[in-house]
């Protein structure tokens, strides 16, 4: 039995979609389906009810879902012990964060948290959104910091996990400024002269956000894809060199915009708002995590109260 089969199955149980889970797991849909079939063959039972849409689990699948989460959690704990992580001080908080938030939002947010809660150690694990969610579900982290959008939600059971909304992120098109401070490229472009487009790799969370924006737009965009990567910082570097236009999180380019190196390259039709959310499992075994959560929760409640 391959450990990837368990991770595939957990993803499918969360998304209820073979195509979406295949994209999240960075494999083709036929390959993903074969891996789910292999897991079912190994177990000797059907885990997926293929007569229903959206995809749902069989009773055996519902039962095995909890077992699969527990198995991954136990393996994560065993790996931590073998890597010597049992010696981590009790005042260390493990946080799973997507790459972009790890480089933009997280450092400033941590400064604010420590200003309120005092000093403590953190261990940051950066990856894609799906892997960050998996880290929380498998017990591999104490906190999950991630993006959320209604059309691309984070599927975590509210009966098991607490959630706080920490802020908002705006995704917009940006391009390098010319000598006059004007963006070199601008949406929507022209059919005769499409805009060089720097794109996110398929399966990246922000790629799906850009696809959503383009699909719901009232105007056709004329883009010529010339580069792709799964990291916003990689796209920003290419934009700064003048290679094209990219959709970037506002927090990732605030300094460059202030310095007039980059500028927004499209009107308000081509922007999208995402929530920045923090998750934790109910009743953490770490007193520090519980204290942090209570402090953050009280702070958010205070801000909402002052806003009324």
Image (tube, rainbow, N blue to C red):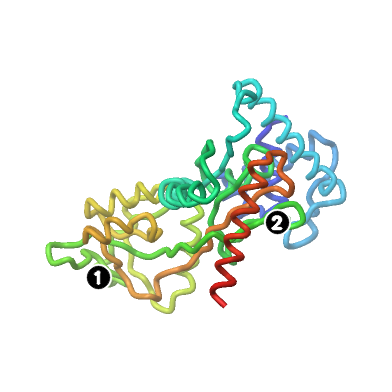
Crowding near the residue tagged with mark 2, few <14, some 14–19, many ≥20 C-alpha atoms within 10 Å = some
Measured in 3D between alpha carbons, the distance from the residue under mark 2 to the one under mark 1, in whole angstroms, is: 41 Å
**Could you tell me which residue is drawn at 27 percent across and 72 percent down?**
190
| Apparent side of residue 164 relative to residue 45 in the rendered image (left or right) | left
Where does the image place residue 212, in percent across and percent down from the top left?
50, 66
Q: Which residue is mark 2?
A: 16
Q: Residue lying furthest left in this view?
A: 179
Asked which secondary structure carries label 1, the reply is loop
- The C terminus: image quadrant: bottom right
The answer to whether mark 2 and mark 1 are in CB contact below 8 A is: no
Q: Is residue 219 left or right of residue 56?
A: left
Image quadrant where residue 7 sits: top right
Would you say 15 lies left or right of 206 here? right
Label 1: few (<14), some or many (≥20) within 10 Å? few
What residue is at 80 percent from the left and 52 percent from the top?
A: 57
Residue placed at 55% from the left, 67% from the top? 303
Q: Which residue is mark 1?
A: 192
Which residue is more in the foreground, 266 or 277?
277
Q: Quadrant of residue 296?
A: bottom right
Chain-order first, disc 2 or disc 1: 2
Q: Nearer the viewer, mark 2 or mark 1?
A: 2
Residue displayed at 39% across by 77% down: 219
* Residue situated in front as seen by the camera: 88 or 213: 88
Where is residue 108 drawn, in percent x and y? 43, 51
Which secondary structure lies at badge 2?
Answer: loop
Q: Residue furthest right?
A: 59
Q: For this view, does 208 lie left or right of residue 25?
A: left
Q: Position of residue 241 (x, y in %)?
A: 22, 51
Residue 285 in percent (x, y) is at: 72, 39
Q: Quadrant of residue 73?
A: top right
Residue 230 seen in render: no
Vertical order, 164 against 10 (above or below): below
């Amino acid at each position: 039995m391959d450990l990837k089969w368990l991770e595939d199955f957990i993803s499918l149980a969360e998304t209820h979609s073979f195509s979406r889970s295949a994209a999240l797991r960075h494999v083709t849909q036929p390959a993903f389906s074969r891996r789910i079939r292999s897991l079912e063959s190994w177990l000797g039972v059907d885990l997926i009810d293929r007569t229903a849409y959206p995809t749902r689990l069989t009773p055996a699948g519902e039962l095995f879902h909890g077992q699969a989460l527990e198995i991954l959690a136990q393996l994560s704990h065993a790996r931590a012990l073998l890597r010597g992580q049992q010696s981590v001080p009790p005042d260390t908080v493990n946080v799973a964060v997507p790459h972009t938030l790890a480089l933009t939002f997280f450092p400033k947010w941590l400064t604010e948290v420590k200003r309120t809660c005092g000093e403590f150690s953190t261990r940051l694990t950066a990856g894609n959104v799906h892997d960050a969610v998996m880290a929380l579900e498998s017990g591999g982290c104490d906190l999950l910091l991630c993006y959320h959008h209604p059309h691309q939600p984070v599927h975590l059971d509210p009966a098991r996990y607490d959630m706080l909304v920490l802020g908002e992120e705006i995704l917009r098109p940006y391009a390098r400024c010319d000598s006059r401070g004007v963006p070199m490229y601008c949406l929507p472009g022209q059919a005769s002269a499409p805009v060089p487009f720097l794109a996110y790799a398929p399966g990246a969370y922000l790629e799906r956000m850009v696809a959503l924006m383009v699909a719901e737009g009232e105007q056709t965009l004329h883009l010529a894809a010339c580069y792709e990567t799964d990291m916003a910082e990689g796209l920003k570097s290419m934009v700064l060199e003048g290679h094209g236009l990219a959709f970037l999180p506002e927090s990732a380019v605030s300094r460059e915009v202030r310095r007039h190196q980059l500028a927004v390259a499209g009107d308000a039709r081509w922007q999208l708002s995402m929530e920045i959310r923090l998750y934790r499992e109910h009743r953490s075994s770490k007193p520090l995590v519980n204290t942090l959560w209570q402090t953050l929760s009280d702070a958010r409640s205070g801000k909402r109260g002052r806003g009324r």
